[in-house]
Image (cartoon, grey):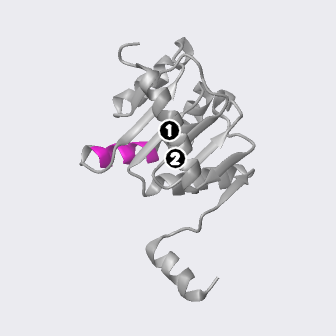
Amino acid sequence: MPSEQRIRELEELVYPVSTRILEDQDQIINEMRRLNYNSTRLSVCSTFGGMQMGYKYLFDDYTNIVDKHQKGEGEGMRWAINIDREALDLVKVFLKVGIQVRHIRNMPPMNFGFTEKGMAGTIEQMKGGRISQSFLFSNEPLYINHFNSLFEEIWKNGIDAKMR
């Protein structure tokens, strides 16, 4: 890569398009934090275990995105989940800080989240809030657009958690 291009990427915080799988838990959390850090929009579709993991490791990132939205920046945060008795208390915590939550009846076979800059996903359930052994990360626009379309359909058919 020419050095001028690399300098421009660093100055503008432009990351080369990439898709990769991470298997180290610290790297997974750090990459999720990096993805969330400058974002003004985050949409997540996950099992209860994914919500527990997010609460345990990323909740400050989530409240930062919500704070930006309340100041007029971006779209804030949305979470699609199957709300059962086990999930109810944590869903209430998310709602209280301004995260929009919708109940979905049928979970897709993959937990995923995306911002305007990238996406992350896993097929593992993250039971008990454990980090998955592997996560797919991509800033490829085709992946981001695909998961955005999928999420919008799920969101449209979901039930507002406050009604649930």
- Packing grade of label 2 (10 A; few <14, some 14-19, many >=20) is some
Q: Which residue is mark 1?
A: 149
Residue 97: name its quadrant. top left
Q: Is residue 150 left or right of residue 122?
A: left
Residue placed most toward the observer, 29 or 136: 136
Q: x, y percentage for residue 163?
A: 36, 13
Residue 65 magenta-highlighted: yes
Q: Residue at position x 35%, y 28% from top?
A: 96
In the image, residue 137 above or below residue 129: below
Mark 1–mark 2 Cα distance, whole angstroms, equals 6 Å
Q: How many marks?
A: 2
Residue 105 magenta-highlighted: no
Residue placed most toward the observer, 125 or 143: 143
Residue type pointed to by label 2: Asn
Q: Is residue 138 left or right of residue 74?
A: right
**Magenta residues, dominant SS class:** helix
Q: Is residue 109 left or right of residue 147?
A: right
Q: x, y percentage for residue 139?
A: 57, 57
Q: Residue at position x 63%, y 52% from top?
A: 137
Query: Which quarter of the rendered picture does the N terminus lie within?
Result: bottom right
Q: Residue at position x 53%, y 12% from top?
A: 85
Q: Secondary structure at mark 1?
A: helix
The stretch of residues the image draws in magenta is 61-69
Residue 93: name its quadrant. top left
Q: Which residue is mark 2?
A: 145
